[in-house]
Amino acid sequence: MVSAPSNSPTVDQIRARGYVICGSGHGTTGFSAPDKDGNWKGLDVETCRAIAIAVLGDGTKVRFVPLTGQQRLTALQTGQIDVLPRTTSWTLRRDANGINFTYPNYYEYDAFMVRKDLGITHTKDMQGATICVQTGSTNEVTVADLSRKFKLGLKTVLFDNVAASRQAFFTGRCDGLITDSSALAAVRATQAQNPDDYVIFPASGNSEALTPAVRHGDDRWFDIVKFVVQVPIAAEDMGITQANVDDMLKSGDPRIARFLGVEPGNGKALGLDERWAYNIVKAQGNYGEMFERNVGKNSPLKLERGLNRLYRDGGLMYPYVFN
């Protein structure tokens, strides 16, 4: 792997130590969770591995640090981790507090899960309900806002980590569980004794952009992570897949030639190998392939792409220009 000078203290540290340190969740199927053999899998995990491919040329050179909602931002701010690709919503106050959000790798909305036999199908039906909430999440604010807006008198039970909140919900300590809709789908599919006993519905109607983040102060590192997140989106937009990426090296399209590093320049601009984007697509495929493999039709979750479709298909995923 031949790279230009990094001009990034974070990249220099990563290359000196030999691996990327990524913050992760405590086990969210489809995003970041170890499989039965202890291997980390999921959309956020693949984002971390893509960063390692770009910077080190090897997607296995990563370390995952499980973090709670309370721990994650502090761990990033204090340098305990290099990057936080862990289901974290991009918000104004987080952005203003030492965090740089790069580009969303998943668009989401918050939702409630309740037992079907309660007969609740809308937030307005939850008068006086007790809600299990993970401390340090945007869901704390959502529950408080909904309670005030609709005069619901909602009561919250706070937990340090998502596993504890899930366990409390399934043992009947709370009437409802609130988190991202995709996480609830994962919980229902993998942890509910009978998934059909539970219903999921939008909490507030607010969409959230789950976005890999870095800390303030290293603009080159920010640029690298931002464009790494963009690679699979741009690849899908250009019709490049894991299966055809080698053939695309011979494409006469100048845009594809620049993107895959056949025409040099992008690697030098970021202090990376010229084939960095090619290497990511070769290892992981495009965004559509990543989505379907981890959370879509080829996964246990079977989620629809929805807002995560490309812009031309009615979604919000839009590629930057790679030149």
Image: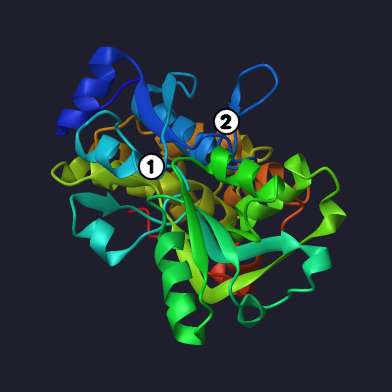
Q: Earlier in the sequence, mark 2 or mark 1?
A: 1
Residue 268 point in image, percent of width and height: 25, 36
> From the viewer's perspective, is residue 80 above or below residue 319?
above
The residue at 62%/56% (across/down) is 174
Viewport quadrant of the C terminus:
bottom left
Q: Quadrant of residue 126?
A: bottom right
Amino acid on which the number 2 mark rests in the picture: Ala
Q: Quadrant of residue 12?
A: top left
> From the viewer's perspective, is residue 20 above or below residue 95?
above
> From the viewer's perspective, is residue 15 above or below residue 194?
above
Residue 283 shows which numbered tag?
2
Amino acid on which the number 1 mark rests in the picture: Glu
Position of residue 98 in the picture relative to residue 172 (left or right): left
Residue 31 point in image, percent of width and height: 57, 42
- Disc 2 is placed on an element classified as helix
**Disc 2 versus disc 1: distance between alpha carbons?**
20 Å
The residue at 53%/75% (across/down) is 204
Residue 263 shows which numbered tag?
1
Viewport quadrant of the N terminus:
top left
In this view of the protein, which residue sits in the foreground, 261 or 217?
217
* Residue 256 seen from this side: yes
Residue 274 point in image, percent of width and height: 36, 33
Residue 244 point in image, percent of width and height: 66, 40
In this view of the protein, which residue sits in the foreground, 212 or 187?
187
Position of residue 151 in the picture relative to residue 309 (left or right): left
In this view of the protein, which residue sits in the foreground, 186 or 162?
162
Badge 1 density bin: few <14, some 14–19, many ≥20, Cα 10 Å: some
The residue at 39%/47% (across/down) is 212
The residue at 56%/39% (across/down) is 164
